[in-house]
Image (cartoon, grey):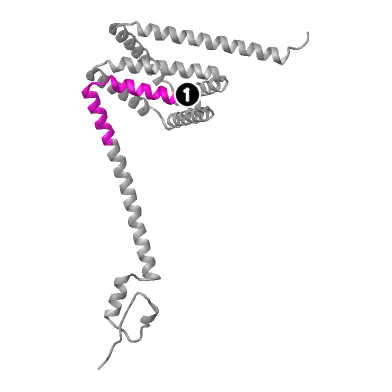
Amino acid sequence: MPPKKRSHIGRHTAAAAAKKAKRSAINASAVAAQRASEDPQQRATRLATNAAVASYDAASTASDGPETRSKRSAIKASAVAAQRASEDPQQRATRLATNAAVASYDAASTASDGPETRSKRNAINASAVAAQRASGDPQQRATRLATNAAVASYDAASTASDGPETRSKRSAIKASAVAAQRASEDPQQRATRLATNAAATAASTFSTHSHDSDQQRSTFQRNSRRRGLTSPNRPYWHLRAFKYEPNFNYSMHADINIGEMFFN
């Protein structure tokens, strides 16, 4: 039997990739439609179920040893990296669009929550992350940081290869999402956001100004020391002229103007 031609293999691979992308898009649209049609009680039940499953998984994995956890994290990271490295531009665009749609839906659904619900959710998320990081050993932390760095590097490399049109579309999507989120804010949410931004800006400005002032002070001190060694400043020469020394050659310095002196 003659070997298959490379063009046939490429066609079959492209067809399989197209089918996979189409299936992923259908699944994503089905999930989005299902979540959009659920009422607040259904959403609360789904979130509670997901939280219970996540808590059970966390409890079951917490009993694993460091070696098992590091192996599992490495397997997941390599699987994600291999999957993203093997996807074509259409698959990547579909994945990013799905993630953007899910993020937009989550943002819209959480924007309708009250301040108490949001504060509870933030506290639960923060405590879960803190507990997970506190239970990790140095090897787990190194693996997590390495995985995050690898994902960030891959995302940066993949977005750097995008064209101007793709970047402009992504910027427009982000801008519209931010605009929609801010338009749905109530006065309390807006006040909280502005206060948080003001505090962050003040902290950043203070750190920048303190760094600049320290750098400027060190520059002044360094220049002052240099002037003291090479060319002293004007007050020094005025003081030197006031305390006249006959053995000092004042004519060598143009910034000192001493008239004719008479001695009785």
- Viewed as shown, does residue 69 lie left or right of 114? right
Judged from the image, the secondary structure of the residue bearing numbered disc 1 is helix
Q: Is residue 172 magenta?
A: yes
Q: Nearer the viewer, residue 231 or 115?
A: 231
Place residue 186 in its image quadrant: top left
> Residue under circle 1?
73
Residue 107 lies, in percent from the top left, at: 34, 18
What amino acid does circle 1 point to?
Ser
- Viewed as shown, does residue 22 lie left or right of 201? right
The residue located at (78%, 10%) in the rendering is 2
Is 94 situated above or below 199? above
Considering the whole magenta stretch, tell me its main secondary structure: helix
Residue that lies at the very extreme toward the right in this rendered image: 1
Magenta-tinted stretch: 170-199
Is 150 situated above or below 202? above
Q: Nearer the viewer, residue 245 or 238?
A: 238
- The number of numbered badges drawn on the structure is 1
Mark 1 residue crowding within 10 angstroms, few (<14) / some (14–19) / many (20+): some
Residue 4 lies, in percent from the top left, at: 73, 12
Residue 68 lies, in percent from the top left, at: 47, 22
Quarter of the image that includes the C terminus: bottom left
Residue 60 lies, in percent from the top left, at: 39, 16
Is 27 situated above or below 83? above
The residue located at (31%, 44%) in the rendering is 207
